Amino acid sequence: MIGVVIVSYKNFDGTVDFINNQLNKISLPLKVVVVDNCSDVQQGAMMAVACNGICVANENERVCSNDSIFILPKAENLGFARGNNLGADFLLRNFECEYLLFTNDDILIEDTMVLDKLIECLNNREIGAVGPRVIGVDGNEQSPHHRVITPMRQLGWKFLPFLRKKKRTNSEVSGIQVPQSSYCYWVSGCFFLMKATDFKAVNGFDPSTFLYAEEVILAERLKELGKREYFCAGTHVVHYGGASTQSIQSKKLKKILKESNCIYYRNYLHSNRFIVWLYRMFC
């Protein structure tokens, strides 16, 4: 069984549409939980009715195994890491989920076998997390990522911007090469699969982050287990993007990104504290 965790933020229609019109394309048995941030029991109940699920006011209560879709309304905005941790914990306490799918609610599933193909990759014990091709609505590839971006590199881009090589978009490239499956540093957090045992072994996402850097931190946590992340080019999803951040001002997002990156640099890359301070001050 696959447990599906969706963290929603003020996106009632989008979340309902994703559950009703995208997840229903998957033939594998699913248990779906929506952590509905900045919501209340009344809104949670409305969402549950709209997607034929049930609203769970207290995530610690036991639920009926016959139900498949659960809405957990949360008055505060838990963010990405804490929200996903809460959803995964709810599923693993109530059901025997072998795999966990972490997905945004702004995803279009075009390959109905996408999860079958990702599961096949996880048969390799070296792989701790796997993601498909993630294609933006502009046609550009959003995954995978192979490089570690250090604070020194960030500072270099800030003060010597000509050093940064601009990634060419698909529209700028003639004779586009088809992506190849490969190990990578991290895959996009908008849609990826893990074994539940590996997620528990790394203690989930770092709850000290709110938004951003969760994927790279997860990659570092998996490395401590001797696990790697894998990019499966044989399947894909389309990512509309921005559903969770469109109502947050860009200045606030930049601050959140910087704070999350500093946690990543200090606690996982063990970067020089002075260099991290320079990054915080100038980038």
Image: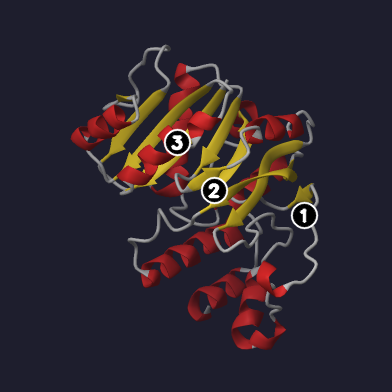
Q: Nearer the viewer, residue 51 or 225?
A: 51
Cα–Cα span, label 2 and label 3: 17 Å
Name the residue carrying label 2: 190
* Location of residue 177 (image quadrant): bottom right
Q: Horizontally, is 251 left or right of 272 in the view?
A: left
Q: Any mark on residue 213, and which?
A: none
Label 2 Cα neighbours within 10 Å, binned few <14 / some 14-19 / many ≥20: many
- Residue sitting at x 39%, y 70%: 250
Q: Any mark on residue 179, and which?
A: 1
The numbered mark, 2 or 3, whose residue comes first in the sequence reads 3
Q: Horizontally, is 275 left or right of 9 in the view?
A: right
- Say which element carries label 3: helix
Is there a contact, CB below 8 Å, between mark 2 and mark 3? no
The numbered mark, 2 or 1, whose residue comes first in the sequence reads 1
Name the residue carrying label 3: 21
Label 3 Cα neighbours within 10 Å, binned few <14 / some 14-19 / many ≥20: few
Q: Amino acid at mark 1?
A: Pro
Q: Residue 280: x, y in percent?
A: 50, 73
Disc 2 versus disc 1: nearer the observer: 1
Q: Residue 79: x, y in percent?
A: 40, 49
- Residue sitting at x 47%, y 53%: 209
* Location of residue 114 (image quadrant): top right
Q: Nearer the viewer, residue 3 or 15?
A: 15
Cα–Cα span, label 2 and label 1: 18 Å
Q: Amino acid at mark 3?
A: Asn
The numbered mark, 1 or 3, whose residue comes first in the sequence reads 3
Disc 1 versus disc 3: nearer the observer: 3
Q: Horizontally, is 186 left or right of 89 in the view?
A: right
